[in-house]
Amino acid sequence: MNKLLTLLAATAAVSLLPSGSQAACVATGTIPRIYMAVGVLTNIGVRDNGAPATFFNFTTTNSNVINAALNAESSHITVQVIGDAAACSAVVNGLSNGGNVSAILVSP
């Protein structure tokens, strides 16, 4: 019985430790525009599906992410983009910065 209580106490203590994960900017919506120029970061805009709509700006140089975003844009498919910003920046005039793309989920 003592071993069981010790195991339960240890499990509870571990579950109370802070998470190793970090916060990120997560935006779900459609991609109305992508800005690409040779030799610079590609900007991917994600328009939040909610009201009032917020426009999130993410950047990347990864060709796989760019291709997924282009396909989602042309098909008007909902995406979820995760940026490396600690949190989405404050919304100013409907715009928020999400940082560099760390993941993109098409059709979440």
Image (cartoon, grey):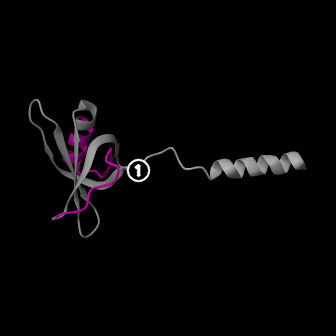
Give the camera-side residue of 85 and 80: 85
Above or below, 66 against 94 in this view is above
Hey, which residue is sitting farthest left in the picture? 37
Q: Amino acid at mark 1?
A: Ala
Q: Residues within 10 Å of mark 1 (few under 14, many from 20)?
A: few
Q: Give residue 64's position: percent from left, percent from top.
A: 27, 32
Residue at the image position 64 percent from the left and 50 percent from the top: 15
Write the start and end of the magenta stretch as one range: 67-92
- Residue 59 horizontal side relative to residue 9, left or right: left
Q: What residue do we see at 41% from left, 50% from top?
A: 23
Left or right of 1, for residue 9 = left
Task: Check if residue 55 falls in the magenta segment.
Answer: no
Above or below for 49 versus 60:
below
Is 85 magenta? The answer is yes
Q: Which residue is mark 1?
A: 23
Q: How many marks?
A: 1
Q: Is residue 38 left or right of residue 66?
A: left
Left or right position of 67 against 39: right
Residue at position x 12%, y 34% in the image: 40
**Percent x, y of residue 14:** 66, 47
Percent from the top left, x then y, of residue 39?
11, 29
| Identity of the residue drawn at 29% across and 41% down | 101
Q: Quick one: 30 or 87, which is closer to the camera?
A: 87
When the figure is inspected, residue 72 is found, relative to residue 87, above or below; the finding is above
67 is higher (above) or lower (below) than 50: above
Q: Residue 100 appears in which quarter of the rendering?
A: top left
Callout 1: SS? loop
